[in-house]
Image (spheres, rainbow, N blue to C red):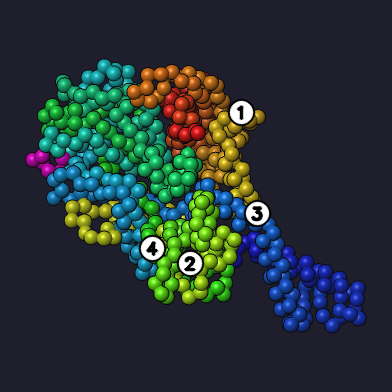
Amino acid sequence: MSDAFLRYYNQELGHIRRQSAEFAAANPKVAGHLRLSQTAVDDPHVARLIEAFAYLTARVRLKLDDDFPELTDALLSVLYPHHLAPVPSTAILQFRPRPELDKPYLVPALTEVESEPVDGEPCRFRTTMPVELWPVQVVSASLAGRPFPAPENPAGAEAKSILRLTLACTDPEVTFTDLGVDRLRFFLNLQPQVAFRLYELLFNHVLSVALADGPEDKSPVRLGRERIGAVGFEPDEGVLPYSPRSFLGYRLLTELFAFPEKFLFFDLSGLSAKSLRQAGNKLEVFFYLDCPPPDGARLINGAAFALGCTPIVNLFKQAAEPILLDHSQTEYHVLADARRPQAREIYSIDRVSATSPAGERAEFLPLYGTHHGGGAPGRHYWFATRRGRGGQERSSEMYLSLVDLALDPSVPADWTVSVETTCSNRDLPARLPYGGSHPRFILAAGTAPIFDLACLTPPNRVLRPQSGDGARWRLISQLSLNHLSLLDGPEPASALKEMLALYDVREAPETRAIIDSVHAIDHRRGTARAPIADMPAICRGIDIDLTLDRERAGTLGTFLPAAVLERFFALYCGINSFSRVTLRAKGHAEPVCRFPARAGARLTL
């Protein structure tokens, strides 16, 4: 029972009692036998009748005030289908190689893993990025200011601090030259306030990188800061599945608010340059920083740089229970698993088909899709409705309707409908114990003889889409926005805040701080060399000044939200243009960061 419905019910019940009491007092001969007052109803039969009527009128009011979900949901299901679905539980999982691993091992994306049971039911997750395991470990890490021991590096002569990593092969008899490793991916496994600050140091304050055998190495390999690569921004690095019809920029905003830890990865490439010089069993990596060590630097150690990690999401494929058509109802409840309804919530319906008793087969297409033009007569379509389940869990159920283009049932009775879905375990993952080697994970299929699994972050709760205060209407209204209409308005900062609020699925103080930190945004036309390989040309673009308030930024700081926003602006640019974002801090004249010009990714016809 939703809070809104209960409020309507109480309002209707109170209204009936007040008006009925007044009516009985004004017409005692007609209504005196009702025995009504504003506080009590003496006749139990009349009381039941009034309560039933209040229940029905409350449903009518709720329907009138629900912002027409049939219309808005249909439009969103075509344009941005992932906005209607809940955001499932997510976490960071580490694959820890065992000593017997002696060569690289690739764990592909979408590998399924299972947690320990909750109420007798294991939670099923899948990885979202491939994991390349190497027989390499991080022995130690430290961040220190001057004076610091480090190899001589002209590019880092102005460094004010050094971030030092010590890597070692797990087998003492094996060297980095033997392995030939060129790239490693690290996850910043620290407390959030330290991890996001360290993320900014790596991507905004590194002058140079050196690979050496130690601080006294006379022939270190010097690398540029471009060897540090950001992770989580590309189309194949998303945590949430999304349709090709969906705009990648909005998915980035959703994941920033729902699971910012997914961005706390970085790639370090160019390690083979040192291997070619006969590297030994150990390899030291020095990051030369242009700023002093921040608060919390003493918390940085070897465990802070975790190898073999990937985000995981509580999603898995599931064949729903068969549905027998009888045309006694306009829609059918889709049950993912009748034996475990409390442990299955449908995230999306992927495919619908039907089979007749004679073995005939019919395929159904989404009604709100792009399959209508030139279609042969007799095609079958489906559309689904998501409704709240009620109760404290606030999960949802899916209902399926099978029609033709005239919205009439198009399949005879006695056919059996098969539905393929993607499901989650509702809110079970949030109840997993965390700490002391918990929660435990295993591969869902097969065995893992060369690695163990460890969960580095607690699985978070399921996040439900906003529904109150016309949120869906505001969401649809911003679909027509692009970065120019955002910036050209009378109050661009307020417009940006309003758009960000639509994707704040957590609605927590730390995510609200991201929105509140937006102080000002300005833009101007600019010219730059086209930021596209093998394209020596000059093109016109847009320079954006984004000013954020550090005092209101909260745990995430200002750099990561700015990094996501600059990708967001670039995705809105046309392919023959660019965007170039400069991050500024409120009250400071010097810019915090000048992001490189980024080529537009929006195709035009």
Query: Is 360 positioned to the left or the right of 11 in the image?
Result: left
Q: CA distance from mark 2 to mark 3?
A: 24 Å
Please report whichever mark, 4 or 1, sits nearer to the chain's N-terminal start.
4
Q: Which residue is mark 1?
A: 488
| Quadrant housing the N terminus | bottom right
Q: Quadrant of residue 116?
A: bottom left
Q: Amino acid at mark 2?
A: Val
Q: Which residue is mark 2?
A: 334
Magenta span: chief secondary structure = loop
Please report whichever mark, 2 or 1, sits nearer to the chain's N-terminal start.
2
How many marks are shown on the rendered structure? 4
Identify the mark at residue 137; answer none if there is no mark.
none
Q: Quadrant of residue 131?
A: top left
Q: Which residues are magenta?
A: 169-174
**602 over 447 or under it: above or below:** above
Q: Position of residue 478 (x, y in %)?
A: 59, 41
Q: Which residue is mark 4?
A: 318
Residue in the foreground of this view, choosing between 352 and 1: 352
Query: Is 210 positioned to the left or the right of 9 in the image?
Result: left
Q: CA distance from mark 3 to mark 1?
A: 29 Å
